[in-house]
Structure formats: structure tokens, C-alpha cells
Amino acid sequence: MSIRLVLSDIDGTLVTSDKTLTPRAIHAVQQLHEVDIMFAIASARPAQGLRRFVEPLAITTPLNALNGGLGVDTSMEILYSYPLDTTNAHSIIDEMLKMSMSVWVYQNTNWFVLDELGAHVQHESGTSNLAPTVVTSFDIVGEGIIKIVGVCDDLDRSRRAFDVMSTQFELVANVTASQPYYLDITAANVNKGSVVAFLAEHYGLSREEIVTIGDMSNDVAMFEQSGTSIAMGNAHSNVQLAATHVTASNDNEGFATAMENFVLV
């Protein structure tokens, strides 16, 4: 079956480790457009962090943010939003704080933190083009929380937190990792796989006509829902084993190589 759409992760996939979108990656997406293959992006980033890719990649498809929890069009109008149950969201926040993790809370296009100088906050702000709102308590955020992130640079503690949260909130939340030091939590059944389902319905495609590409464990859900999947060379072995193909690393033009070898053929 012919390929109609490519859905790509961003960090660790479409861009290099220093967040550069290379000329070769841009050219690869231009080639997709030339043969009428649509190009879309899905990321753990907030929606504002996806806007910078619209112009250089001539994106007209929905921007899929917060691990599939929020979709917007290129003018930032909300297309879909899948919040956590409010009670469950605040229980998750409380549990993360008990485990001494820094906590970030996303509510549609808003980002809330307790400490603007906390771990990775300034870096995330620059990457996502979004300044956080500092609050004294997440109680004031109320309902409509789409994603909660636990941040911890102690990777052993981060892995333990993943195990705890996955077990304790198994029935009400989806727990994954967008980076080894980020624990991402969305509503149950909300993940990058649900982005594939949305795009298939939105454009009247079969999932076999969709190719997905990514590098982290949160990308496996979209691999499972697409006809063809491509793991980056920098991906963990478990992610590579879940994919149809493996390409080079993101710092060695892995995205462009994947388009040339597995899509534009």
C-alpha cells in the first residue's frame, strides 16, 4: 500500500542533539511534499514548541503536542484536548512531590511550575518558546490538566518513580518517558498512538498508509498503530526492536536517511 503520511517525533529524531533542523532534513520533507506525502509532527513538547517547524517544513497538518494530549492547527486553534480526570491529576502531582521530583503541569497551552529556576525549566522554556507560570501550589490550576511531567536528574530515582507511578495509576493514566529524566503522564489511552488514530480519521487514511519515526519509549505507541515504523540509531534497543526499520542517529542525519531509504523509494 502506498505511503500517504509521515508522522515524526521531534527531539532525538527530526532535530539534532543541539536542536538543529538540518538542511538535509528540510530537503527530505520538501521531497515528501513533492510526491504528495503529507508530513506531520508529534511531540512531548507543548504546542508553542512546535510552531517553529511550520514555516521551514511547510507544515499544514495538525500540530500534535503533549504526547497526543493536545492538537492544534497551524494558527494554534485547538483541534482536540484530552485532559486527565481532575482528582487523578492532583493525586499524581501529590505522589510525584512526595518522591521529591520537580513537577511541571500543562493545561492546554499553559505551563505551570513551582520553581522557575528548577531543573531543566530554563532549557525547556527556550526549546518550547513558552515561559512557565510560577504558582505556589498546583491546587489553583484546577481542571483541564493534560500532561504532568516529573523531572529528576537522578536516573535511578527516575526509574523507580516510573515503576511506582505505572503501578499506582495504571488504570487511570498513561505513564511514559520522553527523556530519561522526564516522566510524562497523560490520561489513560492518550499517547502518540492516539495521534496516528486521529490523523488516519482526519484525512481518511488507513493506518497502513502512515509511516512513523521516533527514538524514545513514548514513540513505541505510534509505531504500534502505523503500517511502517522507523527507530533512530540513537534509540534504546527496546525501541529499535519495536520498529520495522532502524536508521542512523539524529546527529548523523538519521531522519533524512530514513526518508530516502524507506519512504522516498
Image: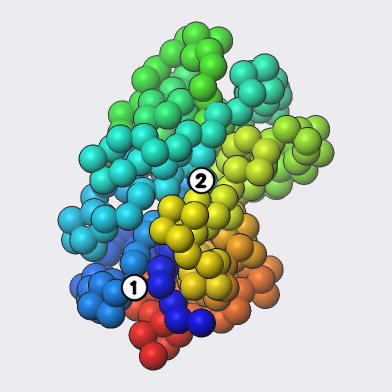
Residue 123: give x, y in percent of width and height: 36, 41
Residue 167: give x, y in percent of width and height: 81, 39
What amino acid is at disc 2? Gly
Mark 1 surroundings: few (<14), some (14-19) or many (≥20) residues within 10 A: many
Residue 229: give x, y in percent of width and height: 55, 73
Where 60 sits versus 44, above or below?
below
Where 44 sits versus 143, above or below?
below
> Dividing the image into 4 quarters, which one contains the C terminus?
bottom left
Q: Furthest-right residue in view?
A: 167
Earlier along the polypeptide chain: callout 1 or callout 2? 1
Q: Mark 1 points at which residue?
A: 37
The structure residue drawn at horizontal position 60% and vertical position 79%, both measured from the top left corner, is 244
The structure residue drawn at horizontal position 47% and vertical position 65%, both measured from the top left corner, is 205
- Numbered badge on residue 230: none
Closer to the camera in the image, 243 or 263: 263
Residue 18 visible (yes or no): no
Quadrant of residue 27 in the image? bottom left
Residue 81 visible (yes or no): yes
Residue 223: give x, y in percent of width and height: 59, 66
Q: Is mark 1 on a helix, strand or loop?
A: loop
